[in-house]
Amino acid sequence: MKQEIGTLLHLYLDEIELTEPIETHPFLINNGAKAINEANGRNWIPLIVKQIDSEKYEVIANSFIFVTAQEAGVKKVWCIVADDSLITAESAKILAQEKIAKINLATASREEIKLGLDYLIKRSINPLVGVNIATATERIEKADRLLWKENLSEIPNLKCGITKGKKLNIFKEIFYLKSSVSSGDSKAKSTEIEEINVKDYNKLTLTTLKTMAKERGYSGYSKMKKQEIIKLLSSSI
């Protein structure tokens, strides 16, 4: 029987498949199993699964819960059923912190660039060192990013502290570029930017939208709701 999307189910472990093994230290798995057993065999954070057959499911997020439940020796786990779209799987993994969200430099706002750089610079493991966030943000934001190559080879040319090799590879962990504007088509660049912005406004956070409104010289946006700011920004295109 096909389950309704969003349904909370108590499923047998042998009805669930984990197709993407996780790399987690046994210490964490053992402690997770202990936590489940101490909670009377309940996993209070559910697995996120998709249905692949009448009585068969596949883990799409919260994989740690699955391996700890196996270690705990429980027969059933609580799960939430999601749809089988790639967007849902991507979103669930990001929310479960199993995957880092990436930023498309073709459409990224100044605030998104700054936040991405700040994350890379301040993270404890393999940080982006020797980069001035203000300088890097300024030079990347003002560059003709839509005309860049998808391998981001233009970044070192900005002289923003991100050099070829290790630093550029770290930068690529969360930044990428995908644009439909071909090199040399400068006339289409500004039009393409606006078209992409209109299409993707709903994907941006309220903070980012307010930053865009400020950069365009609007007033009165601070108390607006998300859809009101989208309408304001769209009216200028």
Image (spheres, rainbow, N blue to C red):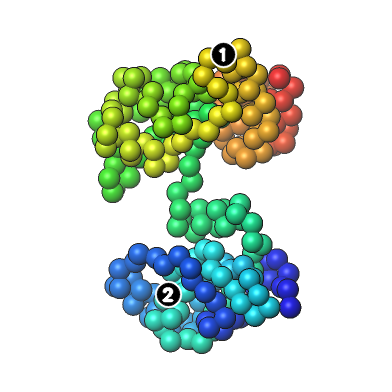
Q: Secondary structure at mark 1?
A: helix
Question: What residue appears at the point 47 percent right and 74 percent down from the top-left corner?
Answer: 66
Q: Amino acid at mark 2?
A: Val
Instruction: Give x and y (percent) for residue 161.
Output: 29, 25
Please identify the quarter of the rendering in which residue 28 is found. Answer: bottom left
Question: What residue appears at the point 68 percent right and 78 percent down from the top-left corner?
Answer: 54
Instruction: Give x and y (percent) for residue 230.
Output: 70, 31
Q: Is residue 13 left or right of residue 138?
A: right
Does residue 95 appear anywhere in the picture? no
Does residue 51 appear anywhere in the picture? yes
- The extreme top residue here reads 187
> Is residue 36 or residue 68 the one in the foreground?
68
> Is residue 41 or residue 196 the one in the foreground?
196
Q: Is residue 154 left or right of residue 105?
A: left
| Distance from Cα at disc 1 to Cα at disc 2 | 52 Å
Q: Secondary structure at mark 2?
A: helix
Q: Is residue 109 above or below residue 48?
A: above
Q: Is residue 113 left or right of residue 167?
A: right
Residue matched to label 1: 186
Q: Residues within 10 Å of mark 1 (few under 14, many from 20)?
A: some
Q: Is residue 230 above or below residue 102?
A: above
Q: What's the mark number on residue 67?
A: 2
Q: Quadrant of the C terminus?
A: top right
Q: Amino acid at mark 1?
A: Ser
Question: What residue appears at the point 44 percent right and 37 percent down from the top-left corner?
Answer: 175
